[in-house]
Image (cartoon, helix red, strand yellow):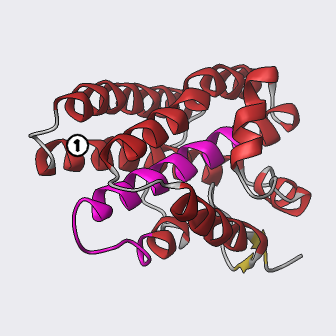
Amino acid sequence: MDFLQPVRDFLGCVTPQAWIDEAIKDIPLLLQDHANCEKKAASTAMNLLFRYNDKQDLQEWLAQLAREELLHYEQVMEIMTKRGLSYTPVTSARYAGSLRKHVRTYEPQHLVDILIIGAFVEARSCERFAAIAPFLDAELNRFYTFLLKSEARHFEYYLSLAERYSPEPIQERVAFFRDCEMALILQTDQEVRFHSGVPASL
C-alpha cells in the first residue's frame, strides 16, 4: 500500500504491536470507539464551519469532510447492528484533549494549530486502520482497508489549509505536535481506544 507511505512519514512512530494485540481482544469495544471517533470528526468539521464561515475554501472542504465522516459513522453502525451490538457511549481517549492543550489562543494561530492537530488525528486513524486490518475477520478487514483510501488523504488536506492560513511557515509547529502525538502513542494508557497509547496491563 504505497499510498500509506506519506502517512507513515508524517507520523513520529508506528503503532506499537502491544496496542494491536490488546485492541483485537475486544472488537465490540473497538467498534464502539470507532463510531464515536467518526461522529467527533464530523462534529469538529461542523464546529469549524460555523466558527470560520468567512473562509470559502475551508467551508467547501469541511462540508465535504463532515459528510464523509458521517457516512463512515453510519457504516460502522451498520456493521454493529449486523453483529447484534447496541450503541453505548464509551469514555474518550486522552489523545485529542491532550493535543488541544497546546493550541494557541489567538488567531490565526489558533486555527492553524487546530488544523495541524486534525492532520495528526486523521493520519493516526489511517495508520491504525492499516495496522489492525490484517488481524480482523474478513468483513472488518475489507471495511478498514476501504477506509484507508479516504483517510489517507485527509491529513494532507488539513495540512494544506494550515499552510494557507498561517502567517509563517508551519514546519516548527508540525514538529512540535509530532513529538506530542508520538509521546501519547508510546506512553501507557489504562483504557484501549482507537487513539490510546500502549495498554498499561502489558
Q: Which amino acid type is marked by label 1?
A: Met
| Magenta-drawn segment | 100-128
From the viewer's perspective, tell me whether residue 199 is left or right of residue 177: right
Q: Is residue 32 left or right of residue 63?
A: right
Residue 87 showing in the rendered view: no
- The answer to whether residue 112 is seen in the rendering is yes
Q: Which residue is mark 1?
A: 46
**Quarter in which the C terminus is drawn:** bottom right
Q: Toward which corner of the image does residue 95 lie, by quadrant?
A: bottom right
* Quadrant (top left, top right, bottom left, bottom right) of the N terminus: top right
**What's the residue at 51%, 47% (across, down)?**
119
Q: Is residue 162 magenta?
A: no
Looking at the image, which residue is at 63% across and 21% down?
A: 149
Determine whether 162 is above or below 112 in the image. Answer: above
Closer to us: 46 or 18:
46
Residue 43 point in image, percent of width and height: 29, 47
For residue 23, above or below residue 173: above
| Nearer-the-camera pick, 121 or 188 | 121
Answer with left or right where residue 76 lies relative to residue 188.
left
Residue at position x 60%, y 26% in the image = 147
Could you say where residue 79 lies in the image, as x and y percent from the top left?
56, 28
Residue 106 placement (x, y as % from top left) = 23, 71
**Considering the numbered disc 1 on the image, is that residue within a helix, a strand or a loop?**
helix
**Magenta stretch, overall SS:** helix
| Mark 1 closeness class: few <14, some 14–19, many ≥20 residues within 10 Å | some
Task: Check the image and report above or below for 168 versus 142.
Answer: below
* Image coords of residue 159 (percent x, y): 48, 42
Q: What's the residue at 12%, 46% (across, down)?
A: 50
Which one is nearer the viewer's eye here, 108 or 79? 108
